[in-house]
């Protein structure tokens, strides 16, 4: 597994109900930007606020329109309940998703053996391949390299989205798993660095606004053109960091609004971007000529 996948935002109407038509438009925008696939129903998509019906609707829309545009779908199927994660994987499989993104369980803070058993059971029972997701800053647990190495031998685990922010940890993981699974960057501003170590791509928030540039960066690195990759990393770096001036996806949704890609409000408990941060965001988008 390799390439650039967009952790796509979920567009809502003003009443915070799902905006199905806008979601279709966003998928077309991503496909036109050259991404390899989309990841609906993840943290960026505000999945903690989804009903079971909304998971189903979002997966169905994304699979249908991603297939039309010839891109892949990695469905967000994570939960801190192992049985629920399995259920979401089965739902995603039934509608035709290519694989499932499964985050480390949050809040209940399992130890490494618990993490191993969680991913093993989900992988064992999921009809589609699993992409594990490690993001300690949001979950309170860190999937350590030794545990990733144990899990990498499972035939239904194909990749890890790694967002610990530790390049030392990234290096240990890549060296340990070799080619058993793909390591994808979950930190937009570290895509170049992780791929220079042997990573195979990224799952990106920033590609919601600049899919072409983020895709070009990933594919330059996959082609072994590190010079071009570095140039693109320098261009995208500040934009990537700006997408995280507040809790994701608050900044990226505001950026999309400023770019004319209206995605509606976030759902509570997430709120609006502050006026100071809007000014900063506008300044950066203007600097890179994304808005006038």
Image (cartoon, rainbow, N blue to C red):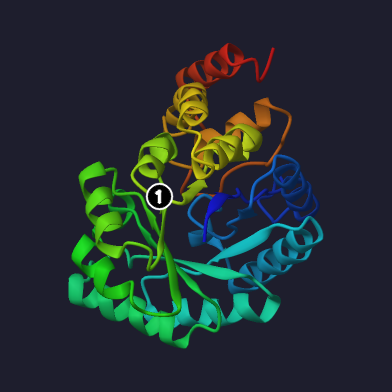
Query: Where residue 225 appears, x then y in whole percent?
Result: 51, 34
Q: Quadrant of the C terminus?
A: top right
The residue nearer to you, when weighing 214 against 177, is 177
Query: Where residue 163 appears, x then y in whole percent?
Result: 35, 49
Residue at x 48% of width, y 32% of height:
243
Residue 160 to residue 3: above or below:
below
Residue under label 1: 199
Query: Where residue 101 appears, x then y in whole percent?
Result: 48, 65
- Describe residue 278's horizontal placement relative to residue 185 as left or right: right
The residue nearer to you, when weighing 268 against 140, is 140
Query: Where residue 234 appears, x then y in whole percent?
Result: 46, 22
Label 1 Cα neighbours within 10 Å, binned few <14 / some 14-19 / many ≥20: many
Q: Number of numbered discs present?
A: 1
Q: Is residue 6 visible?
A: no
Residue at x 38% of width, y 63% of height:
179
Residue at x 46% of width, y 87% of height:
125
Residue at x 47% of width, y 81% of height:
86
The residue nearer to you, when weighing 229 against 203, is 229
Residue 51 to residue 120: above or below:
above
């Amino acid at each position: 597994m390799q390439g650039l996948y967009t952790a796509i935002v979920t567009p809502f109407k003003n009443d915070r109900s799902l905006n199905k038509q806008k979601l279709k438009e966003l998928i077309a925008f991503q496909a036109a930007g050259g991404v390899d696939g989309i990841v609906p129903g993840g943290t960026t998509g505000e999945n903690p606020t989804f009903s079971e019906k909304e998971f189903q609707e979002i997966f169905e829309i994304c699979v249908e329109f991603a297939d039309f545009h010839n891109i892949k779908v990695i469905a967000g199927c994570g939960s801190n309940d192992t049985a629920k994660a399995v259920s979401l994987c089965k739902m995603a499989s039934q509608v035709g998703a290519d694989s499932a993104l499964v985050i480390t369980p949050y809040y209940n803070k399992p130890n490494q053996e618990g993490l191993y058993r969680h991913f093993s059971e989900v992988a064992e029972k999921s009809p589609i391949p699993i992409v594990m997701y490690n993001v300690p800053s949001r979950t309170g647990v860190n999937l350590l390299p030794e545990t990733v190495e144990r899990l990498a031998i499972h035939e239904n685990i194909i990749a890890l989205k790694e967002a610990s922010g530790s390049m030392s940890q990234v290096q240990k993981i890549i060296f340990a798993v070799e080619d058993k699974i793909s390591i994808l960057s979950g930190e937009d501003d570290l895509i170049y660095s992780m791929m220079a170590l042997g990573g195979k791509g990224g799952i990106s928030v920033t590609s919601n606004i600049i899919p072409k540039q983020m895709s070009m960066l990933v594919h330059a690195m996959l082609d072994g053109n590190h010079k071009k990759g570095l140039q693109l990393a320098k261009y995208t770096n500040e934009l990537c960091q700006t997408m995280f001036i507040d809790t994701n996806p608050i900044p990226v949704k505001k950026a999309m609004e400023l770019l004319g890609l209206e995605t509606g409000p976030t759902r509570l408990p997430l709120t609006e971007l502050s006026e100071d941060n809007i000014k900063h965001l506008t300044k950066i988008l203007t600097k890179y000529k994304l808005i006038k």
